C-alpha cells in the first residue's frame, strides 16, 4: 500500500492501534469533508502496531485534546512538503466538550447548550475538575 506525502497539513503518528477514528472524533474532524489518509494497524518498532493520520490542508485543528486521547502520538506540521515543526502532546490545561460532568446537579447536565468545561487539577495526575461544580473527572 502506498500513501503519498502531503504538501501542507499535519501528520499524527504513533496513534494507538485501532483508535484513529476515535481520535478524529475528538479532534472534531469530519472524514466525509476533510482530505485525509488513515493508516490503521501498521507496524511500529516502538509499539508493535500503530495508526497514522494524515490531514491535508488542516485548518483550525485543536490538537490539545491529543494529550488526553493519544499522548504518545507525535504531530508533524508540514509546509511545502517539509516538516517545519514536530510536537509531542501534553495534558491540556483546559478541555471543552470532551469530558462530561457526572454530577446530576451540575448546571451543564440540567441546562442545555452549556459547554462542558474542565480544568486540569495539578494536585493529582490526569484529574480534571468541572468549571461549574468542581466535580472531579478522569478521562
Image (cartoon, rainbow, N blue to C red):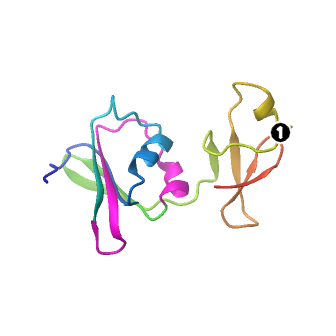
How packed mark 1 is, by other alpha carbons closer than 10 Å (few <14, some 14-19, many 20 or more), is few
Number of marks in the rendered image: 1
Q: Is residue 54 left or right of residue 115?
A: left
Which residue is denoted by mark 1 in the rendering? Answer: 104
User: Considering depth in this image, is 111 or 48 the residue closer to the camera?
Assistant: 48
> Which quadrant of the figure contains the C terminus?
bottom right
Q: Is residue 63 above or below residue 88?
A: above
Q: Is residue 114 left or right of residue 52?
A: right
Q: Residue furthest bottom?
A: 45
Residue 110 pos. (x, y %): 80, 29
Q: Residue at x 39, y 55 (%)?
A: 18
Q: Residue furthest top?
A: 112
Q: Residue at x 52, y 50 (%)?
A: 64
The question of residue 66 being in magenta is answered with: yes
User: Considering depth in this image, is 42 or 124 the residue closer to the camera?
Assistant: 42
Residue 34 pos. (x, y %): 32, 33
| Residues drawn in magenta | 43-70
Residue 12 pos. (x, y %): 35, 54
Q: Is residue 30 above or below residue 75?
A: above
| Image-quadrant location for residue 16 | bottom left
Q: Residue at x 77, y 33 (%)?
A: 109
Residue 73 pos. (x, y %): 41, 61
Q: Residue at x 16, y 50 (%)?
A: 3
Amino acid at each position: 500500500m502506498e500513501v503519498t506525502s502531503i504538501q501542507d497539513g499535519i501528520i499524527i503518528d504513533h496513534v494507538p492501534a485501532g483508535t484513529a477514528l476515535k481520535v478524529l472524533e475528538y479532534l472534531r474532524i469530519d472524514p466525509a469533508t476533510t482530505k485525509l489518509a488513515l493508516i490503521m494497524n501498521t507496524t511500529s518498532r516502538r509499539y508493535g502496531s500503530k495508526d497514522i493520520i494524515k490531514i491535508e490542508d488542516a485548518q483550525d485543528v485543536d490538537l490539545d485534546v491529543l494529550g488526553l486521547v493519544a499522548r504518545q502520538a507525535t504531530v508533524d506540521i508540514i509546509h511545502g512538503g517539509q516538516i517545519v515543526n514536530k510536537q509531542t502532546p501534553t495534558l491540556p490545561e483546559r478541555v471543552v466538550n470532551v469530558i462530561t460532568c457526572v454530577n446530576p446537579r451540575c448546571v451543564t447536565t440540567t441546562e442545555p447548550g452549556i459547554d462542558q468545561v474542565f480544568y486540569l487539577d495539578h494536585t493529582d495526575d490526569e484529574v480534571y475538575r468541572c468549571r461549574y461544580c468542581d466535580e472531579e473527572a478522569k478521562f
